[in-house]
Image (cartoon, coloured by chain):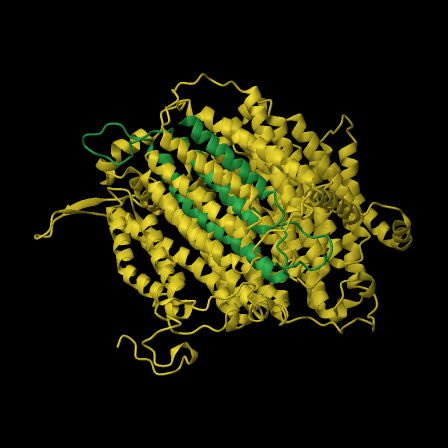
Amino acid sequence: MELLVASAIGVMTAGGIYLVLRLRTFPVILGISLLTYAVNVFLFSSGRLTIGAPPVLSDDVTRYTDPLPQALVLTAIVISFGMTAVAVMIGLGAFLGSDDDHIDDQPEPRETEGQP
Amino acid sequence: MPSILLDRFELTLLGPTLSLFFIVALPFLGALLPGLMNAAGRAACAGVTFTVSLAAFVGLLTNLPQVLRGELVTARVNWMPELGLNFTLMLDGLGFFFALLILGIGLLIIAYARHYLSRNDNMGEFFTYLLLFQGAMVGIVLSDNILLLLVFWELTSLSSFLLIGYWKHLPAGRQGARMALTVTGMGGLAMIAGMLILGQIAGSYDLSVILQNRELIQADPLYLPALILILLGCFTKSAQFPFHFWLPHAMAAPTPVSAYLHSATMVKAGIFLMARMWPVLSGTPEWFAIVTTAGLVTMVLGAVIALFKHDLKALLAFSTVSHLGLITMLLGTGTAFGAMAAVFHILNHATFKAALFMSAGIVDHEAHTRDIRRLGGLRTLMPVTFVIATLAALSMAGIPLLNGFLSKEMMLEEATHTVLFNTPWLVPVLATVGSLFSAAYCFRLIGHTFLGKVRDDYPSKPHDPNPGMWLPPAILVVLVVVIGVAPFLAEPFVKTVTASLLGEAAEVPKAYFKIWHGLVPALFMSIAAVVGGLILMVIFKPLSNAWEAAPRPEAKVIFEGIIEAAASAARTFTHTLHNGAFSRYAMISFVAIVAIGYHAWVTGTIGDATRAVQAAGPVPIAGWAMLVAATGALVFMHRNRFLALILIGIVGLMVSVGFVYLSAPDLAMTQFTVEVVTIILLLLALNFLPKTTPSESTILRRARDTGVAIAGGLAAFALAYHYMLRDAVATPISEFHLANSYKGGGGTNVVNVILVDFRGFDTYGEIIVLGIAALLIYALTEALLRGPVRARLLNRIPDQPRAGDMHPMMMVVLTRVIMPVVLLVGFYIFLRGHNEPGGGFIAGLVVSIGVVMQYMASGFTWTSARLKYPYHGVIGAGVLVAGFTGIGSWFVTKPFLTSDFTYVRIPPFDKFELATAALFDVGVFLAVVGAVMLSLESFSRLARRANADETEHPMDINPARAEGSSDPIAPVKEGG
């Protein structure tokens, strides 16, 4: 189980990094989203993995998983939505303003981008 | 917490200590008034400033009896006791003396400035800065805590920056202000370090404790570094060599500022601190060598330069530098007599120098020039100003029957007993030379400005100003003469101040203040100085020519060279690293993080695994396979952007399924709902963005990126895997949360109780951040729609074929039917949140999805016409509800956000729980709904601009409408 979660984190991180290093805004935003998943799962896993023991108190249960990372990750998920939305808005604004969705500053005016 | 603070405050405020807080707080509070009174006219503006200062002045004077009795008045409020930082004030003779100078001369300056400033100057702004400065200065001299003192110290640097640069239109003013801030600010930084060391040595940051520990501090190996650092602060502030150069450039300020800051107050702050620290720091060879030498050099250098300055204020500025050097030298000798002479000279210098600055201001104001070469003969034109300036200047020159003579005699007397570098003649000779040049520039000031022939080429015909301008300096000159003729009047006061300066380190000297001491060496040195000064005046012309011809370093050029070099180094460094290629920054940070992590991995010790690997069944493996496949496909097929969206949706879905499996139902619900809104958001954005990503990067670049990505992925994998197989090194707080969730928080869903109760303050911050993000998106949309983008959007031709039926009937009907159900589900999830998975965050997201469905199905216009509350308001209401819930606990004297709960029973129903945490959760819910909806709405507003053919009807094709969608204003009989 641990191997599965850890490798999932690794795969998502690798995919996220690769996409963040792309040249256009959209893949970079996707890459940030992937990295967000990876980080959230990593933070969650810092409470160690427990199967079938949700932190909802009940009289006849004594085994619970660690609730604190869950609470922290819950807000992190919501905040990351806000962050993604801001990043998308900036990317969109830049594209609408300059007709260019490159991430890097372009050295000089290029030939117009062919729209598919 | 706040209530405890209040109690202490009330306790300490009772009794006579009230006035200490009052004195310090009054200028700061009063600083609000001049700006407000600006509209009421200049007299009202100056009047209110004067009243504020007067109130503080009177408050200070009420403490005079205690001070004269030698008592220590203290006031204390604990601020951050853990750091040793307390708001502790104390008033002794020394503090009283300086506070008297600051507030007393401040009053005169305010009256003077009222008439000095022209109608073009914003008087409210000026007086606001002046009061801020006044408060900071009073704070310095009354602080009993050195950390508090540092706070006020930096405040004086900042407020003096504003005052020096008050005439923003003058480049000289801006440059002078910047130079002053740079030099004094750097000194301030050094002093912070010095004070921290001192506090560490003494074991307390309270001055009263530090002053008791002379032996301990001087024996400490860190004494010398602390001394040097503190002296750096003092020397920069008091313009001692080699930091003297900023003061003349600060003369670009309006003259009231020069008279106030640069004669009586700010430049004396360094002197004050040396005097304050005198009992603990002085008396060592290091103190003697550094302070006396710096003072002596400054005194001679300042006097020599002053003689050759043609600008009246520059002359006075360098003479101030010289006199500050004199005082520093007296403090440096480390004898009680030297300290007493220093105190006396501080008093005398403040009186004659402030009067001189104000006189220079009058000359500038009336003749429209301060250039001595263009003046002369003003004696007959401005008789009042002439008398004031002459008496003050003669006092500065050290002529008997004026107060400057008395303290200069004491200085020369002290100099004859001071042996520096084993050379007995060095100090007396240099002191005499300094006095000689000092006398010379005073004579030049009088002779070249006021005496001589009346000229006919003044830029403006000068005459005496109205009394409002000459009365303030006249009052000071009266003091100059009174002290000069009857020094015994000042003697008890000066001795009281000296006694509190010396503390227990030395006895107050027995010497009496007299005009005639007999034929002592000091008298001959004084005579030599005056005669030499007269001779210099006679040969001034050739001397001045020689001075002009001589090469000498220009401090401003050197200073600007250093600044320019530092700036260009910083620029090169920044521009090399930040060349606008964002993917490069990302690459650098990824590589750096992995490299540092690797270093930690290799050099650290990794314990053995303490947990067993849990077995995974086929279902988790299948889920894992889907997640990995979707991620891989996303990377390979990301160029097709729609497909990429679907793939990332799968990844998110699998993550939430994983959360369910791993006992995190709350997380799964949150992840799932966030996933929905994120995809909608990205779809809205993709409406405008290109639908594919072109292939641009080279194979080499892709290979490099792949390498970095794999390294990063491996690192994350290794870290996570090792982490999960080891137990925590210390007991996590989670045990506490589990044990107290029901007892203390009244809920069984521990995650929700943590969010709204244990860590409610965190959550409160987070909903605020979320709200800010949404407002940012809104603001960006507004900015885009107001700019050139608007036209572009209106002209935009959709790059995809439009749907013929944009709002299909089935979808409209379905979403409307489903809406109450969604709201019900949201409500249910919200209510059960405290005890079962759910809560404000998830409920907020669910309700948002319900509302978004209405937008998608029925169209933007139709939906927004039916919304009563703007989303900004919803965010604000959410934050306020959460905040007020937290504040509510103050009323029962509990800390912010303390929760309480009870069980109530309304007869027909079962008993249920009411918790304040639920109210807080309502705030969370509202903030989440508002933030999500505001973000999505902003995106769709862009879309609406682009598709102008919106209708107000929810459905494009509606059989109930007679005419169909072609005629939107046709009579509608809906629901019929």
Can residue B238 be seen by looking at this rendering?
no
x and y percent of residue B918 in the render? 26, 49
x and y percent of residue B899 in the render? 26, 44
Residue B652 vertical placement versus B508 (above, below): below
Q: What tint does the image give chain B?
A: yellow
Q: Is residue B708 left or right of residue B767?
A: right
Q: Residue at x 69, y 60 (%)?
A: A112
x and y percent of residue B458 in the render? 80, 71
Quick one: B451 or B298, which is closer to the camera?
Answer: B298
Q: Residue at x 48, y 63 (%)?
A: B33
x and y percent of residue B966 in the render? 43, 79
Quick one: B78 or B530, which is closer to the camera?
Answer: B78
Q: Is residue A69 left or right of residue B910?
A: right
Q: Residue at x 51, y 18 (%)?
A: B605
Q: In this view, which residue lies farthest toward the left?
A: B907
Residue B753 vertical placement versus B619 (above, below): below
Quick one: B466 or B369, which is closer to the camera?
Answer: B369
Can residue B703 be seen by looking at this rendering?
yes
Name the image quarter holding residue B336: top right
Q: Considering the image in quadrants, where does the C terminus of chain B appear?
A: bottom left
Q: What tint does the image give chain A?
A: green
